[in-house]
Amino acid sequence: MGLLDGVVAVVTGVANKRSIAWGIAQVFDREGAQLILTYQNERFFENLEKLVPELNRRPEVVELDVVHDESLERLGAWLSEHHPEGIHALVHSIAYAERRDLEGRFLDTSRDGFLVAQNISAYSLIALSRTVVPSMVRAGWGSIIALTHQGSTRVMPNYNVMGAAKASLESSMRYLAYELGRDRIRVNAISAGPVKTLAASGVRGISQALKMTEERAPIPENISTVDVGHAAAFLASPWASHITGNILFVDSGFHILGA
Ligand SMILES: NC(=O)c1ccc[n+]([C@@H]2O[C@H](COP(=O)([O-])OP(=O)(O)OC[C@H]3O[C@@H](n4cnc5c(N)ncnc54)[C@H](O)[C@@H]3O)[C@@H](O)[C@H]2O)c1
């Protein structure tokens, strides 16, 4: 028996084997979930095709670019057609900011750069939730999980515009949790410690953040993407049936430090 037997889950954001979403997909697969993996565009499709043979059962794969409403609508229609009984879990593992906004002075953030980061990294949680909620209502329950970082509430050098986007993402998570609870849909976020991924390599100083965890976190070692997968599997499972509106830290305890 797996923790996620019978669960149908949409997992976004697998760019390559280092992606946090890939750690989540591996654990979900191992725990018996039926996976629907989304990819941003053709470039990522090729990476995904190379990875999927590592899973126990072949996932369905669907293109999704969250900046395009038509792409979200296509996903909604695809879910209705291919999963008429609904889906139970959504993992939002998507973020983007222009590289120039992830270094230098926050004061110099451009309007465009700010809006790009908010659109892709925060608004997409609302748009994507709206897309999958009808499927979760059909299924009778749901669990939406977003990936965040402590830079939402504390200053991390160079995280800059992404810190503001993560604050917006976390607030959106709480408003969604408030609205969707009556439909038995839970909405939570996992605040992950630093992991060297494609997205993280855009943030100057990621190596320093990894070193700081090893030197100063209560558990003095860095997390893995599978650690995040375990937390996500718990949140997607019936074991978390009355947990909503939470931020679960998977960061070796770094967030409790004062100085
Ligand atoms: N790596 C870290 O240190 C860290 C720490 C905490 C939180 N996070 C968060 O984890 C999540 C996943 O990031 P990651 O670190 O695994 O990096 P990643 O680069 O592997 O994943 C980011 C994903 O976002 C997707 N994406 C970007 N724009 C998109 C769009 N328009 N439409 C659809 N998908 C789009 C990319 O295709 C990619 O798969 C992000 O929300 C990130 O902020 C990362």
Image: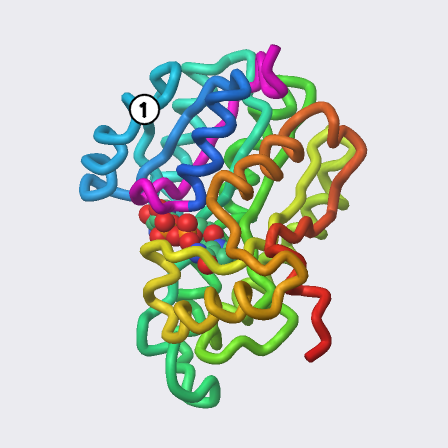
Q: Residue at x 54, y 57 (%)?
A: 221
Q: Is residue 106 left or right of residue 184?
A: left
Extent of the magenta region: 1-19
Residue sitting nearer the eye, 110 or 26: 26
Scheme of image coloration: rainbow
Quarter of the image for the N terminus: give it: top right
Q: Quadrant of residue 60?
A: top left
Compared to residue 19, the image places residue 155 above or below, namely: below
> Helix, strand or loop at disc 1?
helix
- Magenta span has 12? yes
- Magenta span has 90? no
User: Does the magenta stretch mainly form a helix, a strand or a loop?
Assistant: loop
Q: Is residue 212 left or right of residue 114?
A: right
Mark 1 highlights which residue?
54
Where's residue 97, x and y in %? 38, 66
Compared to residue 218, the image places residue 81 above or below, namely: above
Where's residue 51, x and y in %? 28, 30
Q: Is residue 112 left or right of residue 251?
A: left
